[in-house]
Amino acid sequence: MTDLLRVEGIEVFYGASQALFGVDLTVQEGQAVALMGRNGMGKTTTIRTLCRLHAAYRGQVWFAGQTITTLPSYKAARLGIGLVPEGRRCFATLTVTENLIAAARPGAWTLERVQGFFPRLAERAGQQASTLSGGEQQMLAIGRALMTNPRLLVLDEATEGLAPVIRQEIWAAIRALKAQGLSILVVDKTLSELKPVADTCVILERGQSVWSGTPSQITPEIEHRYLGL
Ligand SMILES: Nc1ncnc2c1ncn2[C@@H]1O[C@H](COP(=O)(O)OP(=O)(O)OP(=O)(O)O)[C@@H](O)[C@H]1O
């Protein structure tokens, strides 16, 4: 398998305050990787840095065989990094279909295919995004990222704040996308939900990657030490 994304030793500052102290992670083509860690450990900062929404002070990011460490974010998106940001961030006053079309780039994921994948987005086609339920907004956020025809789908806390039954629906969608061959990087905290999806887990602790392995290698000790409350 070839590396699609490789992050090496990234360090990031917010003003004078350092948030990342050396994060390494790799996503191979077709793989699903989970980025885990307690609140405030640097997961969102890592994702925003590899999407080029933050500058790395040190370290390197490679995507699809080229270094993207200094690329503007729109160019990183064009190379095929599709971000589903924390908080969903759809255009509230646009309809569901307008949101999808606004993100479209040529490729196998068309409006029809996205609507087929999430039938709810077809049912709600003319509805303003702001009037959708949380779960539907999350489907729209994923649908928007798919419309960019990404090579890597990056999901930041995709199931946060959703009811259990809706969480299951979102996880089922993520599993289906993986089964279709999409490479995925997912930030989440719930190990039981990540287990059926993730090939590899990377754990962050105080802005550093401190552990990586398969979900089944996460012992109760590791869980308690790095992921427990
Ligand atoms: N805009 C900002 N300005 C200053 N510090 C920030 C900013 N955003 C995040 N930080 C700090 O950077 C560190 C990492 O935050 P980050 O949001 O990346 O963590 P996280 O693991 O995604 O947390 P959560 O699970 O709560 O979303 C934290 O100490 C946080 O306070």
Image (cartoon, rainbow, N blue to C red):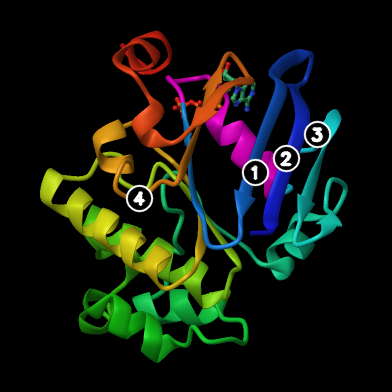
Q: Dot 4 lies on which element?
A: loop
Q: Are marks 2 and 1 in contact (CB under 8 Å)?
A: yes
- Tell me the residue at 44%/20% (across/down): 39
> Local crowd at mark 2 within 10 Å, few (<14), some, or many (≥20)?
many
In the image, what residue type sits under mark 4?
A: Val
Q: Are marks 3 and 4 in contact (CB under 8 Å)?
A: no
Ligand 1 in which quarter:
top right
> Local crowd at mark 3 within 10 Å, few (<14), some, or many (≥20)?
many
Work out which quarter of the rendered image holds the C terminus and state it: top left
Q: CA distance from mark 3 to mark 2?
A: 11 Å
| In this rendering, the label closer to the viewer, 2 or 1 | 1
- Tell me the residue at 46%/64% (across/down): 91
Q: CA distance from mark 3 to mark 4?
A: 29 Å
Q: Which residue is mark 4?
A: 197
Q: Which residues are magenta?
A: 37-51
User: Relative to 36, is 102 on the left or the right?
Assistant: right
Q: Is mark 2 within 8 Å of ligand 1?
A: no
Q: Which residue is mark 3?
A: 56
